[in-house]
Image (spheres, helix red, strand yellow):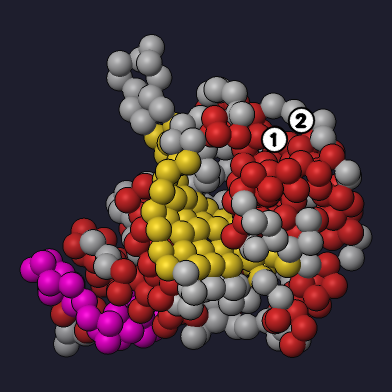
């Protein structure tokens, strides 16, 4: 007997998109234990090849958000601007943990940061791995996360702990990865933060994802959102090279940005690093390693010992995060505040406070 996923796969293969209602039905079947991983993987492959619409991504995200475990935030914490800053992953450029370092800087500057993430999937060190190497707990219960957000303005929400429905998706996702096939779940991670942030800075590995993901954030009711993709220009001395893109703001080339305020509307723009006086460099300047190596890079940046491109990358992305969180009125002001937060020692004190809990 055919199930809905098989019917939807046939529909997608025929070039017809899913409706919102069909997308919600698909989520219900994807998280069922009694449907095979092969059927789920075939559906996810067909969906990716057809191309996910804004409406379908939003419907998937909302259905999965409804299944997540929410940390019990008190009214005062909930009244704050709550920020998440993360990349979707998938740029395969082996940089250090930029967004995690940015999250710590921004929290030290006084923004409440609910960092939603996982262990490494497409890199050597995921956000959970590097925070653990810094001595910061990543296995907080929902109740502990709520207290940490209230008292320390930072909590890491380890995705598997908050999304029990995903346990029946793991094998299908693994099958797709073995096929070299990206799926809608490569885009969904940053959209599923169980703390329900009011502001988000998301990095994506291709510029064409910026506007659709920002539209999805807007549909989900995020107050302020920015989705970015940063260009790494091809090597002029290597005719075989090609442009690459970071799922962060780039200090090397043009940045593509889609952003919105719910009350002010939507816009797309570009940003050049030279606007911030950043000197030209190369991708290897941002190279990371395993969790231990990346934790030491983060410590050096936050102590003020690192004054080169790695620091610039953190400052540029922290500038955007502080702007999105309404802590500053411009990215220029955000850069200055991020510098002050590092150079005053506040960022290092934030790591110590989180590790001493």
Question: Range of the magenta residues?
Answer: 8-36
Q: Residues within 10 Å of mark 2 (few under 14, many from 20)?
A: some
Q: Residue at x 16, y 80 (%)?
A: 7
Query: Percent from the top left, x then y, of residue 82?
Result: 66, 71
Quarter of the image with the C terminus in it: bottom right
- Queried whether the magenta region covers residue 311, the answer comes back as no
283 or 207, which lies in front?
207
**In the rendered image of this protein, does residue 180 appear above or below residue 11?**
above
Query: Percent from the top left, x then y, of residue 107?
Result: 76, 59
Whether residue 2 can be seen here = yes
**In the rendered image of this protein, does residue 97 appear above or below residue 40?**
above
Query: Percent from the top left, x then y, of residue 27?
Result: 36, 80
Residue at the extreme left: 14
282 or 296, which lies in front?
282
Q: Residue at x 76, y 30 (%)?
A: 306
Whether residue 156 can be seen here = no
**In the rendered image of this protein, does residue 201 appear above or below residue 276?**
below
**In the rendered image of this protein, does residue 342 appear above or below residue 288?**
below
**Residue underneath mark 2:** 306
Task: Name the quadrant containing residue 8.
Answer: bottom left
Q: Quick one: SS at disc 2?
A: loop
- Queried whether the magenta region covers residue 14, the answer comes back as yes
Residue 337 tag number: none
**Residue underneath mark 1:** 311
Task: Name the quadrant containing residue 41.
Answer: bottom left
* Marks 1 & 2, CB-CB < 8 Å contact: yes
Position of 354 with respect to 233 (left or right) is right
Measure the C-alpha gap from mark 1 to mark 2. Answer: 6 Å
Q: Earlier in the sequence, mark 1 or mark 2?
A: 2
């Amino acid at each position: 007997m055919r199930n809905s996923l098989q019917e939807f796969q046939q529909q997608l293969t025929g070039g017809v998109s899913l409706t919102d209602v069909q997308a919600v039905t698909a989520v219900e079947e994807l998280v069922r234990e009694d449907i095979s991983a092969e059927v789920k993987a075939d559906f996810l492959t067909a969906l990716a090849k057809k191309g996910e619409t804004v409406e379908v991504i939003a419907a998937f995200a909302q259905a999965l958000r409804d299944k997540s475990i929410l940390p019990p935030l008190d009214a005062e914490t909930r009244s704050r601007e709550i920020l998440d800053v993360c990349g979707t992953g998938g740029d395969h450029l082996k940089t250090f943990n930029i967004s995690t370092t940015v999250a710590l800087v921004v929290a030290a500057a006084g923004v409440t940061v609910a960092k939603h993430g996982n262990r490494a999937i497409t890199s050597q060190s995921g956000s959970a791995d590097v925070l653990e190497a810094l001595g910061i707990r990543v296995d907080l219960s929902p109740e502990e996360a709520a207290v940490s957000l209230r008292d320390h303005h930072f909590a890491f929400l380890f995705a598997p702990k908050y999304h029990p429905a995903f346990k029946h998706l793991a094998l299908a996702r693994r099958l797709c990865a073995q096929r070299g096939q990206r799926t809608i779940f490569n885009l969904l991670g940053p959209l599923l933060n169980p703390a329900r942030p009011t502001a988000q800075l998301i990095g994506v590995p291709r510029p064409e994802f910026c506007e659709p993901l920002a539209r999805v954030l807007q549909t989900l009711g995020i107050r302020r959102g920015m989705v970015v993709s940063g260009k790494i220009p091809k090597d002029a001395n290597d005719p075989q090279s090609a442009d690459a893109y970071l799922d962060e703001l780039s200090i090397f080339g043009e940045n593509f940005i889609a952003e919105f305020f719910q009350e002010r509307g939507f816009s797309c723009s570009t940003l050049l690093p030279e606007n911030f006086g950043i000197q030209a460099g190369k991708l290897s300047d941002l190279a990371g390693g395993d969790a231990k190596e990346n934790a030491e890079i983060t410590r050096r940046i936050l102590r003020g010992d690192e004054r080169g491109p790695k620091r610039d990358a953190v400052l540029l992305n922290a500038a955007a995060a502080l702007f999105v969180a309404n802590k500053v009125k411009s990215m220029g002001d955000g850069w200055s505040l991020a510098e002050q937060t590092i150079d005053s020692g506040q960022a290092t004190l934030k790591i110590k406070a989180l590790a001493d809990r």
